[in-house]
Image (tube, grey):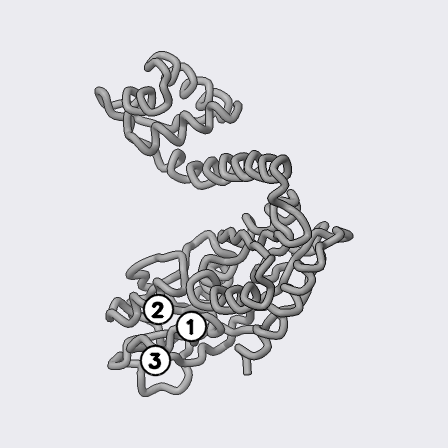
Amino acid sequence: MNFRHLEIFRAVMATGSVTAAANQMGLTQSAVSKALRQFESALGISLFIRENSRMVPLPEASALLHEAEGILGRAARMVDLASDLKSGLTGPDFLRLAAPVSASEALLPPIIAQFLRERPNVSVETIFGTTNEIEKLVEERQVDIGIIRYSHSSERRLKVIHLADDESVCVMPQEHSLSSKSVITPRDLRGVPLIMLGRYRRTRTSLDQLLRRSGVVPTVKIETHTITSACAFAANGVGVAIVGGLFARLHGQLPILIRPFSPPLKHRYVIITLDNAQLPQVAKALISNLVAKFAKVQE
């Protein structure tokens, strides 16, 4: 298996046919077909059903696509970093920050904007992704600083700096039947349409386990992958979202109600850097700034 196999796999998934993928990549159809067979052979599984000229992806192909895009994305970022190093774009006044997608939508932009106004010679690159992706970016030195929801796996090769503590809350439309309750419990959610964050998140696993222990089979109306979209779906009457309170409260302008969820699902947000890494002064300044700003958000 090689990067070319991953690129061809991604192209076939995007176009739905060998012919279109071949045209997109400037290859022959036979080269694309051969590469796909080699890719499936290396993995030991079938990825597509071939129906005439169409390539219908099996569930296994859909499950692998995200990981393939992650590998290709990291490789592209490494090439970009090498180009920046060659051209001198990196240096003491340039830093890279990786953070959760939800932080990109309401929390980080004003913090970083103020930081840059105070330091006109500084440039920042932001990358947004999942906790696993951010940990890899820090470990591979592709970013200077990462912001993640803490887990014990985060300790490997990484320095951890406490940023904020949080608990899950329930977000619902203002006229919801549960609006009269001051606290929402798992049993209150029996039969209630739910808006759930993506099933591959670590916090989703904890929530599923909590509901199961309470004898509640969740009625999942929609799955989404950002707190902003979950709150927006709740505001539009889709159901009740169970999300982190820190980010949910940033969307108070929406027609929603926020209620504590009990027993609480606790979260801890931290800054991570590569252990023993020599950070530029501008990165240290941003870390201090983030710690101070997150403390204010929690007040």
Query: Pointer 3 and pointer 1: residues touching (CB < 8 Å)?
Result: no
Which of marks 1 and 2 precedes in the sequence? 2
Q: Amino acid at mark 1?
A: Ala
Which label is found at residue 248? 1
Q: Is residue 104 above or below residue 6?
A: below
Which of marks 3 and 2 precedes in the sequence? 2
- Left or right, 175 with reference to 151: left
Which label is found at residue 257? 3
- Left or right, 252 with reference to 145: left
| Name of the residue lying farthest toward the right | 276
Label 2 to label 3: alpha-carbon separation: 10 Å
Instruction: State the residue position of label 2.
Output: 231
* Residue that appears at 42% across and 72% down: 248
Label 3 to label 1: alpha-carbon separation: 10 Å
Residue 214 at x, y percent in the picture: 44, 71
Q: Residues within 10 Å of mark 1 (few under 14, many from 20)?
A: many
Query: Pointer 2 and pointer 1: residues touching (CB < 8 Å)?
Result: yes
